[in-house]
Image: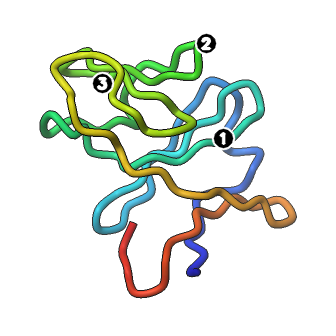
Amino acid sequence: MEKIFVCLTADLPPGEARRVDCDPAVAVFNLDGTIYALADRCTHGEASMSDGYLEDDCTVECPVHTARFCLRTGRALTQPATVDLKTFEVLEDGDSLYVLVPTGESP
């Protein structure tokens, strides 16, 4: 696995998201102290999920199409999205956050 730096833990407060610029990009969310990572591009179109609306029910809503995805599983929960988002493991190492990506793959 390859560790990709996201940010310092303190720089991602609860209720916030951060986009990790790689190919393709990853969206990292802090929901009440639990960190989740999903593919950043909505599976329905060209929208950044890191710009989406983080909901208390552990979902994120696409900022353009209003499709909702589960932060835990990446599952597409509402139309117009029908394809799930890829999820990534998050590692907290000291005061830094990383996403873990299979070696040889971009997230």
Q: Residues within 10 Å of mark 2 (few under 14, many from 20)?
A: few
Give 6 or 78, whichever is nearer the viewer.
Answer: 78
Question: Where, by quadrant of the figure, is residue 36 drawn?
Answer: top right
Between the C-alphas of marks 3 and 1, the distance is 20 Å
Q: Residues within 10 Å of mark 1 (few under 14, many from 20)?
A: some
- Mark 2 vs mark 3: which is more N-terminal? 2
Side of 50 where 82 appears, left or right:
left
Between the C-alphas of marks 1 and 2, the distance is 17 Å
Instruction: Give how far across and how far down residue 12 sits, in percent.
Output: 66, 41
Residue at x 58%, y 59% (from the top left corner)? 6
Give 53 or 73, whichever is nearer the viewer.
Answer: 73
Instruction: Give how far across and how far down residue 7 sits, in percent.
Output: 63, 57
Instruction: Give how far across and how far down residue 20 sits, in percent.
Output: 44, 57
- Quadrant placement of the N terminus: bottom right
Query: Label 3: which residue?
Result: 62
Residue at x 61%, y 12% (from the top left corner)? 56
Side of 66 where 75 appears, left or right:
right
Q: Amino acid at mark 3?
A: Cys
